[in-house]
């Protein structure tokens, strides 16, 4: 006998208050395929009812049903447990929760020896112009 949604939320709240809350038992934190499909459908139908989704109701029902049947059939025939939402979930996860590394924790923050001027044995830095810019090369020839 499945539990009523009210009982489930009360049970989760009671576990949280008592200090024995197990998040792995909460359906909203670890959604299964039917929960994800139902959530997607509820969002789509809500958007359609608020006129944010410019499609007629019977067309949306047909597209949603076709999506469910096609994906469930594909999952059963291929024996695949990968969900059609995995690519979208990965993109959302990377966008919202993974910040890009602006620095490497293993690298030194001071400038490296390669980027500093070439030191001569007597300690004076070389003033040789950069040969990558033709204007610098011409100006160095004129001063020589």
Image (cartoon, grey):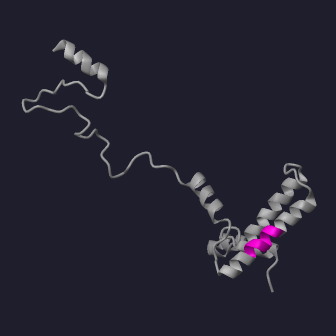
Decide whether residue 70 is among the magenta residues: yes
Quadrant in the picture for residue 74: bottom right
* Residue 10 seen: no
The residue drawn where x is 32% and y is 49% is 107
Residue interval drawn in magenta? 66-72
Residue 90 visible? The answer is: yes
Residue depicted at x 64% and y 78%: 80
> Looking at the magenta stretch, what is its main secondary structure?
helix
- On the rendered structure, is 81 left or right of 9? left
**Quadrant location of the N terminus in the rendered image:** bottom right
Residue ranking furthest to the left: 122
> Is 7 left or right of 91, judged from the image as shown?
right
Residue 120 falls inside the magenta stretch: no
Residue 115 image offset from top left, x and y in percent: 26, 36
Give the x, y percent position of residue 93.
60, 58
| Residue 57 on image: x %, y % | 92, 59
Position of residue 130 relative to residue 100, above or below, is above
- 57 vs 75: above or below: above
User: In the picture, which quadrant includes the C terminus?
Assistant: top left
Residue found at x 67% / y 65%: 85
């Amino acid at each position: 006998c499945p539990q009523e949604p009210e009982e489930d939320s009360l049970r989760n709240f009671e576990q949280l208050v008592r200090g024995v809350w197990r998040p792995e038992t909460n359906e909203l934190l670890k959604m299964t395929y039917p929960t994800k499909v139902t959530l997607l459908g509820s969002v789509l139908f809500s958007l359609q009812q608020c006129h944010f989704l410019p499609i007629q109701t019977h067309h949306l029902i047909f597209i949603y049903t076709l999506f469910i049947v096609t994906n469930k059939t594909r999952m059963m025939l291929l024996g695949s447990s990968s969900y059609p939402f995995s690519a979208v979930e990965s993109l959302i996860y990377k966008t919202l929760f993974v910040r890009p590394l602006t620095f490497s924790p293993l690298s030194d923050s001071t400038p490296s020896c390669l980027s500093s001027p070439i030191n001569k044995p007597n300690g004076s830095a070389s003033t040789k112009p950069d040969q990558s810019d033709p204007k610098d090369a011409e100006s160095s020839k004129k001063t020589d």
